[in-house]
């Protein structure tokens, strides 16, 4: 199913685990227009889709922005053979980055199902939306429902279990996944605070000392969708995060944006920093207050 040599991979594809796990990166400049990042962030970030591969089948996590569709199709084609059965799992059904390219990918590959916590996933991903155009034909798509906590299988049989569960920290409906085979935790819009000053990266963090510190993480959270944490009830969030770390042997954190965090020491330090920041934002420690939309914290 896999191409014979790694040098046939399209630009933006990195083989994280040989033959089993790939990241498909699409780069974006940070110039104040990307709402997933603070308005004062400058440099570049990567929009990450992930591909879990087994003989004859693959699972794609998120599908990227419409602007990147052509490149993502080329990236997929460089990894998968035409006969590969592809499943897609948008980790956030109400986010463009997760759902935008489901339809175009299904037009070019053998997409057998879309995983979702909603029975009407086809509506959420606008699958068949081109039927509004003259002469277009809407094509059906199978939705496979996923419970709040459930183990999925990549490929045939039960050789590649992937654990899906609600994200312990979230603003909207979000799933995290843990791939036991590669010991990778896919965290969607969490742990996305690592970006690059340069377009060429680097796009992996492999030493704990290269992580940006707690002050940066705190500012990132409060200047993006997690502004509400300040003065909030964070003890339960801390417990849930510790439970994820304790239950799974995680050697890679694979976020939806930014750098991939690799190595047990890096993972441990990242969780420690998140716990430290959440403790410092807790009710009784930090004061909840009105925040002007242009305030940078």
Image (cartoon, rainbow, N blue to C red):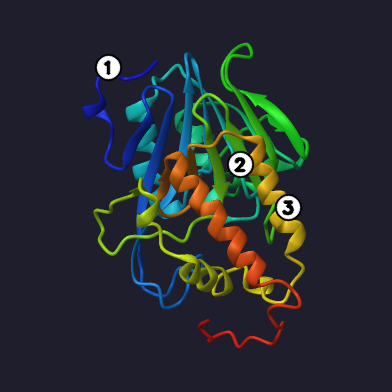
Q: Which badge, 2 or 1, comes first in the chain's sequence?
A: 1
Residue for badge 3: 239
Please, which residue is most extreme toward the left here?
7
Figure check: 29 above or below 290: above
Please, which residue is most extreme toward the top here?
157
The answer to whether one can see residue 140 in this image is no
Left or right of residue 143: residue 31:
left
Q: CA distance from mark 3 to mark 1?
A: 45 Å
Q: Residue at x 49, y 33 (%)?
A: 107
Q: Label for residue 128?
A: 2
Q: CA distance from mark 2 to mark 1?
A: 34 Å
Q: Secondary structure at mark 2?
A: loop
Figure check: 209 above or below 186: below
Q: CA distance from mark 2 to mark 3?
A: 41 Å
Task: From the image, state whether disc 2 or disc 3 is nearer to you.
Answer: 3
Left or right of residue 41: residue 160:
right
Q: Label for residue 4?
A: 1
């Amino acid at each position: 199913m896999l191409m014979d040599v790694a040098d046939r991979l399209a630009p933006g594809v990195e083989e994280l685990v040989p033959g089993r796990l790939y990241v498909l990166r699409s780069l974006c400049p940070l110039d104040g227009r990307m709402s997933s990042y603070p308005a004062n962030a400058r440099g570049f970030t990567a929009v990450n889709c992930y591909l879990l591969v087994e003989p004859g089948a693959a699972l794609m996590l998120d599908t990227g922005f419409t602007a990147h569709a052509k490149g993502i199709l080329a990236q997929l084609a460089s990894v998968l053979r035409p006969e590969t059965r592809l499943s897609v799992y948008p980790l956030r059904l109400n986010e463009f980055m997760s759902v935008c390219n489901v339809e175009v990918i299904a037009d070019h590959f053998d997409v057998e199902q879309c995983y979702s916590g909603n029975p009407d996933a086809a509506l959420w991903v606008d699958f068949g939306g081109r039927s509004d155009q003259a002469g277009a034909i809407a094509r059906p798509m199978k939705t496979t429902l996923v419970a709040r906590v459930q183990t999925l299988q990549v490929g045939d049989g039960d050789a590649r279990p992937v654990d899906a569960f609600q994200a312990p920290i979230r603003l909207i409906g979000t799933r995290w996944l843990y791939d036991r085979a590669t010991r990778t935790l896919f965290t969607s819009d969490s742990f996305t605070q690592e970006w690059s000053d340069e377009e060429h990266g680097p796009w992996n963090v492999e030493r704990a000392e290269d992580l940006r510190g707690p002050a940066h993480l705190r500012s990132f959270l409060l200047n993006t969708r997690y502004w509400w944490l300040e003065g909030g009830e964070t003890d339960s969030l801390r417990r849930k995060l510790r439970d994820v770390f304790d239950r799974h042997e995680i050697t890679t954190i694979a976020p939806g944006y930014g750098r991939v965090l690799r190595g047990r020491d890096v993972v441990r330090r990242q969780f420690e920093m998140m716990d430290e920041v959440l403790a410092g934002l807790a009710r009784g420690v930090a004061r909840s207050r009105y925040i002007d939309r242009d305030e940078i914290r």
